[in-house]
Amino acid sequence: MARFLLSKTSFTHYLECPIRLWLEKVRPDLLPPEDPALERLFEQGRIVDDLSRGLFTNGVAVQDYNESGYRNTKQAIAEGAKILYQPTAVADGLSARADILTKGKGGKWDIHEVKSATQVKPEYVSDLAFQRICFEAAGIPIGKTFLVHVDNTYVRHGAVEVDKLLAEEDLTEDVTSMIPEVGRRIPEAKEVLGWPRELEESQIATCVDPSKSDCVIFWLNSLNPVLRERVLRAANPFKIGKLLEKEVISPGGLTRGFLESVSYRTPEEHWPHKKDIERIKEEIGKLVYPLHFFDYETYSSAVPAFDGYRPYQQIPFQFSLAVQESPDSKPRIHDFLMETFEDPAPKLIAALRKYIGPKGSVISWYSVFEESRNEELALMHPEHADFLRGINERMFDLMQIFKQKLYVHPDFLGSASLKNVMPVLIPSLSYKDLHIQEGGEASASWLPITDPKLPKKQREQLIKDEIEYCRLDVHAMVKILEYLRTL
């Protein structure tokens, strides 16, 4: 028997993977640490939720969750409210908190689900179907169901225009057709809420695709090898084999018999053949000195931060640049970091013009990212378009040597990411020694840096951390190119 109310969020997690729901409700002690990037995503959702009330003004904000929230919702309805923010319904072991309810025709209420995404996703239909089932079971009849989401074609000019930033779609027909399926799956999810702290074989077997949940991957990889093999044996062998191939699940500690049973073969170490070395030599032979090793850090938000930007547009606020005049010369390092919360583009472009000359290759890792930012800046600042597009014409993507498998190593784990390649080829370099270790953290750090209320010492440390992180990406490219030349 379930020991918890089944919320709409929990139900969504059940549809993703039953083990994820079990971990969150029964064994939260096994969950991975909170992800700062995920928390920032939640914050974006809260901002969009607050803005959406501008589409439905003069509503009543319902306080609390679950039974208390349901009592307050019923009281607001009894007192004649026509628009409710965050109302809750509880019935039949279910709990659903809607974003906005509006009084519709025939005494029925319309649900307006608010998402910070830019399009309708299949899981949103299931989410709305769950809400409809719960609210109607709680005695609150539902008419239509809508999804409010961000319109990524909106460009900010002046104050944010909520009616243009947010779009609304009527999903009533899709939601209605989904109700039977959701109704069938709800009892299954309730059973998971009653699972014991130690899973049985049949319960473990419900985890057929761990790649769909970071929680499940973390759980699997934290188990001792014997138990992990038992868990994987209970799952779908074909899918587990694919997960091993993709390195979603590590083969370390698993028996040879199990690996063979899922048709998995450990990658053999593959140093470049002579023909691959020739191709690498050919590729790096295209480089023209002076070399400019270049990397952007960017910030994005659901609500455009500055005029001229779209929702979620990547705003470059920082770059690191290493300029090497000749193969034997020591690179000169240049850094730019916008330290106030304003459009960085004018100052950033001025710094680029100062440090990047008219000749020489510009080297990035996955250069399409830097190229896209430059093209966006060129469109927004046409007076600098020739310069920015000139940089793009000289771009060299160092990642392609690894993406095209000209150089393969099993410790890359099948990835051409700089974070996978660097520690293998240049073991003296490591992100683990830094306070900021990945791009999401770097992006999230920009707002605190620009906050004038942040204590001086803390701000100075954060600036230092930010520059060190961006510099390491650039330094890694310098060293990897040096290594490739030794081939």
Image: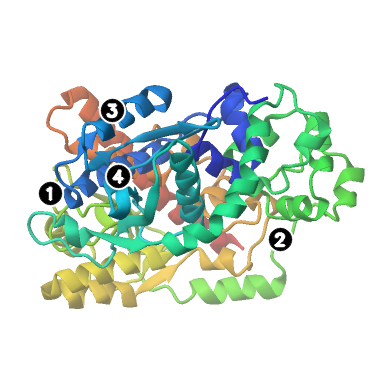
Comparing 280 with 459, the one in front is 459
The reply to whether dot 2 and dot 1 touch (C-beta < 8 Å) is no
Q: Going from the N terminus, do you reach mark 4 or mark 3 first?
A: 3
* Quadrant position of the C terminus in the picture: bottom right
- Left or right for 362, reference 232: left
Q: Which mark is residue 100?
A: 4
Q: What's the distance in space between the residues labelled 4 and 1, CA to CA?
A: 33 Å
Q: Which mark is residue 342?
A: 1
**Residue found at x 80% / y 29%:** 200
Tell me which amino acid carries mark 4. Ile
Give the residue number, with chain letter if any, for mark 3: 75
Residue 464, image x, y percentages: 28, 35
Q: Going from the N terminus, do you reach mark 3 or mark 2 first?
A: 3
Comparing 20 with 431, the one in front is 20
The reply to whether dot 1 and dot 3 touch (C-beta < 8 Å) is no
Q: Going from the N terminus, do you reach mark 2 or mark 1 first?
A: 2
Q: What's the distance in space between the residues labelled 3 and 2, CA to CA?
A: 71 Å
Residue 376, image x, y percentages: 25, 69
Q: What's the distance in space between the residues labelled 2 and 1, CA to CA?
A: 48 Å
* Quadrant position of the N terminus in the picture: top right
Comparing 209 with 336, the one in front is 209
Under circle 3, the secondary element is: helix
Do we see residue 360 in this rendering? yes
Tell me which amino acid carries mark 3. Gln
Mark 4 vs mark 1: in front = 4
283 vs 325: above or below: below
Under circle 1, the secondary element is: loop
Do we see residue 321 in this rendering? no
Mark 3 vs mark 2: in front = 3
Residue 221 falls in image quadrant? top right
75 vs 292: above or below: above
